[in-house]
Amino acid sequence: MNKRIECYGVSSVERPKIKATKKLDLSGDCGQQIVKSESKLALRTHRKTFEKLADM
């Protein structure tokens, strides 16, 4: 990707890798609610993709 950016006259910059510092606890009722809501969001966002995969 660096060469692609440099074609436009912009110099590329090395960015530091950021590691996740928080741990998400998915056990219990709160964790179950998080999993359900994120699953519903993914299904709603990518509905056509899942329909095509189901037809295969």
Image (cartoon, rainbow, N blue to C red):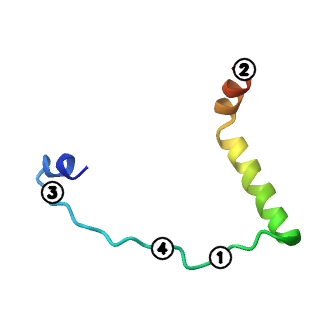
Q: Is residue 5 above or below residue 13?
A: above
Residue 14 x %, y %? 25, 67
- Looking at the picture, which amino acid does disc 4 mark? Lys
- Looking at the picture, which amino acid does disc 3 mark? Val
- Name the outermost residue toward the bottom: 21
Task: Look at the numbered disc 1 and give the secondary structure of its residue.
Answer: loop
How many marks do you count on the picture?
Answer: 4
Residue 7 placement, left or right of 38: left
Report how far apart the C-alphas of labels 4 and 2 lie in the structure.
38 Å
Q: Is residue 54 above or below residue 8?
A: above
Report how far apart the C-alphas of labels 3 and 2 lie in the structure.
45 Å
- Looking at the picture, which amino acid does disc 1 mark? Lys
The picture quadrant where one finds residue 37 is: bottom right
Task: Look at the numbered disc 4 and give the secondary structure of its residue.
Answer: loop
Task: Please tell me the numbered disc located at residue 19.
Answer: 4
Q: Are marks 4 and 1 in contact (CB under 8 Å)?
A: no
Between disc 3 and disc 1, the foreground one is 1
Residue 21 x %, y %? 55, 79
Residue 17 x %, y %? 38, 70
Between disc 3 and disc 2, the foreground one is 2
Task: Look at the numbered disc 2 and give the secondary structure of its residue.
Answer: helix
